Image (tube, grey):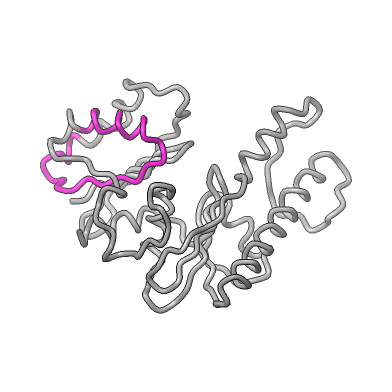
Amino acid sequence: MYLIGDIGNTNIKICLFNSKLISVKKINFPTSSLNKKYLYNNLKFLKKYKNKIDTILFSSVVPKLFKLIKKILKKIITIRCLELKNCNLNKFVKIKVNRNQIGSDRLANAISAIDNKNNFIVIDFGTATNFDVIIKNQYIGGILAPGVQLSLNNLVDRASLIQNTKLEKIKNVIGKSTNTAIRSGFYHGYSGLIDNIIKLIIKQTGKSFKIILTGGLAHLFKNSIKRKAIIKKDLTINGILKVAIKS
C-alpha cells in the first residue's frame, strides 16, 4: 500500500493507494501557525492501515511542515517517510535546471504529464500560478506568476472599500459594480496573462504543446484561454504515485 502526500502552502492532501485509490484526506492548514496536535488528530486515521503501508512518499514546498509530519508519522507507521526530491528521478524526467530551485510539486506535475512523445505546458493554479515546460522527457524550466486567489485576498486586505468576491466567469469586460469590476479584472486579466505566457513559450522554443491545467481554479480558465486545454485534477498526486510505484 502506498501513502502519498502533497504538502502545499495552504493545504495538505493525503492519499492511500493499493491497486486503486482507497482513501483521501485533505487538511486545510495555515502554515504560519503549525500545530502538532491538530496534525496528529488529522493523521491518526492512518493507524488502521499501519501494517499495510510499505511506501510513504511526499511532495512538499514547506520544509518545516514536512519535518513535523515526518515526526508524527514515525509514531504511527514505522517505515521511513521520503520526500520526492530525495528520490532518483532521472528515469522519470531529465531536469535541465537547478533542481534545488524547483518545488517538488512542479516536478511531480512534470513526471505525471510526461509521455515521451508530446510537449506539455502545465499550468497549476495554486498559491502561485505556475507554468512548467516539458519537452518530451525533459523539464526545461517554467514561469511563476502571482496566484489568482492570493492576489484577490491581498487586494481585499489592502483596500478597505473592497469586500471579498467570489471569482467566476464573466462575459462583460466593463463592470457595473465593484464586484463585477473585480471579477472582470481577474477573469479577463489572468486569461490574458495565461495566453501571453503560452504564446511566449511557443515563440521561444519553436515547439507545439499540449496544455494541462490543474489546481483549484483550473475550471475557471479552461474555456477562457485561446488554446485547447485539459484539466487533470490529481496531476500532482499521480506524479508522486508514479515515482513511488516505479522506484
Q: Is residue 233 above or below residue 59?
A: below
Q: Is residue 178 above or below residue 135?
A: above
Residue drawn at (43%, 47%), measured in percent from left and top? 101
Residue drawn at (47%, 73%), measured in percent from left and top? 119
Relative horizontal placement of residue 96, taking residue 128 as reference (left or right): left
Residue drawn at (40%, 79%), measured in percent from left and top? 117
Relative horizontal placement of residue 146, taking residue 133 as reference (left or right): right
User: Residue 59: horizontal and vertical position, in percent?
Assistant: 35, 46
Residue nearest the observer in this picture, 74 or 102: 102
Relative horizontal placement of residue 225, taking residue 83 as reference (left or right): right
Q: In this view, does 238 lie above or below 5?
A: below
User: Residue 50: horizontal and vertical position, in percent?
Assistant: 15, 39
Residue nearest the observer in this picture, 156 or 195: 195
Residue drawn at (44%, 37%), measured in percent from left and top? 11
On whether residue 65 falls in the magenta region, the answer is yes
User: Residue 153: horizontal and vertical position, in percent?
Assistant: 65, 34
User: Residue 115: horizontal and vertical position, in percent?
Assistant: 37, 73
Relative horizontal placement of residue 196, taking residue 134 as reference (left or right): right
Q: In which quarter of the image is the C terminus?
A: bottom left
On whether residue 120 falls in the magenta region, the answer is no
Q: State the count of labels.
A: 0
Q: For residue 137, which quarter of the picture?
A: bottom left
Q: For residue 38, which quarter of the picture?
A: top left
The segment highlighted magenta reads: 47-73
Q: For residue 146, which quarter of the picture?
A: top right
Residue nearest the observer in this picture, 56 or 102: 102
